Amino acid sequence: MAEALKIGVAGLGTVGTSVVQLLEKHGEQIARKTGTAATVSAVSARDRSKDRGIDVSACAWFSDPVEMAKSADIDIYVELIGGESGAAEDSVRAALERGVHVVTANKALLARHGVELAELADTNNAALNYEAAVAGGIPIVKTLRESMSGNDISRVYGILNGTCNYILTRMEAEGISFEDCLADAQRLGYAEADPTFDIEGNDTAHKLAILTSLAFGTKISSDNIYMEGITSITTADIQAADELGFRIKLLGVAQRTDTGIEQRVHPTMVPKSSAIARIDGVLNAVAADGDFVGEIVLVGPGAGGNATASSVVADIADVARGDRTSALGMPARDLKDYQRARMRLHEGGYYIRLSVFDRPGAFAEIARCMGDAGISLESIVQKRQSAEEPPASGNTEPPQPVILITYETTEVAIKEALDVIMSKGVVAEPPQMIRIEKLN
Ligand code: NAP
Ligand code: HSE
């Protein structure tokens, strides 16, 4: 067996501790499979005195991860700190500059600096592996980068955030409040250090930026990805979706269109009959459409220490085996700039929930506004509100929830129609609008 590789693990939180545990439990089996042992010889975190339930007393301790990354005693630097800059970025750069292989789960870092870091890895003949950065335990990076490399990919999409899927699933199934579901996701180690990254869609956008690059051979860019999180989703929307044959999922979608690559993150109505509708809890699903293979869908746990450690250790095993694939599937200098399709040109069906004043002519006004914008309605459902609910301030007639489902139209037409409806004074509050995705 080749000489053992020495691993430095920076970050001993949810993922870092699971990685140490996994290597301790399965280290020998991995060594047999790869032909090279890989053992944790150094660690770094902020608080040395914290009880983490793991024994790292035999490892060198570094309070500064950059120093660890620069240490001559490290062959593989595993970054599990998080964040797009600061210690995570500095230490990864330091490792790559020295030609030390890097494994990271940090999608924020890759979404911001992925191309530069991939170039640095290419220049210094080092691996930059990051399977855990997208969809936790699902091997989608390897699938796109290696297994689907013979295909032209037209679309990649999926449920990419475990925290949001966990929240939406429990709100629907158990009627638990958004806040309580989020607190549970944090307790279970699914959420980011700053959970607004999960619930506002940033984390999904970071992952989508990476997937877009892998799928289309483009530079990574997370700026200006169209992004809406799940904070505006109410139990009224979840119930209405259920009654209309949909479920609500936070999707990230990147697809080729005639005007460029469309990249969007938003809550989405998906048909209950679709495969994606059945992805519950912390599970993620990622689908990619290849011209030769057709659609491939991968499902698995998208967050949590053990699932994420599984991907981190697979990346370590690739290094131990001597596998070297360019970080983004091709030399970083060959990645292309790309044209992003404008969201206003997005085409699809829409769910719209209006709170309509119950007075003569209000419905006719709404229908006229939609018709004037060239929007055809597939269905209109009026849901009688309970008498206890007070009327909106300044109005005597209690507003009634009305749900519209449109046929396919454009984003710009919907936005214009809703602006006109608002200006007519027939609705009590800004409309709720959720895009509908046609899926199998
Ligand atoms: P976490 O539980 O918050 O752990 C972060 C660790 O980094 C802690 O051990 C912390 O030390 C350490 N740290 C913070 N700043 C440091 C610094 N300046 N120097 C040295 N150590 C520092 O985070 P996590 O959930 O394990 O996530 C780690 C990374 O994996 C993030 O990039 C995250 O996005 C990614 N990821 C997480 C999951 C998941 O399910 N949790 C899944 C996929 C990817 P102390 O413990 O001493 O405070
Ligand atoms: N916070 C992330 C999520 C962790 O919930 O999906 C996995 O990337």
Image (tube, rainbow, N blue to C red):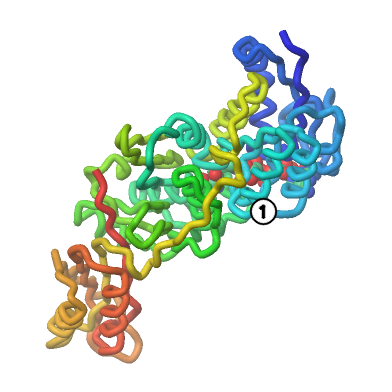
In which quadrant will I find the C terminus? Answer: top left
Looking at the image, residue 274 lies above or below residue 419: above
Question: Which quarter of the picture shows residue 194?
Answer: bottom right
Rendered residue at 24%/49% (across/down): 271
Query: In the picture provided, is 49 more to the left or to the right than 34?
Result: right
Amino acid residing under circle 1: Glu
Rendered residue at 65%/26% (across/down): 316
**Residue 244 x %, y %:** 19, 56
Q: Estimate how packed mark 1 is, as few (under 14), some (14 to 19) or many (20 or more) residues with alpha carbons within 10 Å.
A: some
User: In the structure shown, which secondary structural element does the residue marked by tag 1 occupy?
Assistant: loop
Q: Residue furthest bottom?
A: 394
Looking at the image, residue 381 lies above or below residue 304: below
Rendered residue at 65%/18% (across/down): 25
Query: In the picture provided, is 401 more to the left or to the right than 79?
Result: left
Residue that carries the numbered disc 1 in the rendered image: 84
**Residue 246 x %, y %:** 25, 52
Does residue 278 appear in this view? yes
Rendered residue at 73%/28% (across/down): 54
**Residue 315 x %, y %:** 61, 29
**Residue 269 x %, y %:** 29, 55
Question: Which quarter of the picture shows residue 44?
Answer: top right
Q: 117 or 47, which is in the foreground? A: 117
In which quadrant will I find the N terminus? Answer: top right
Does residue 184 appear in this view? no
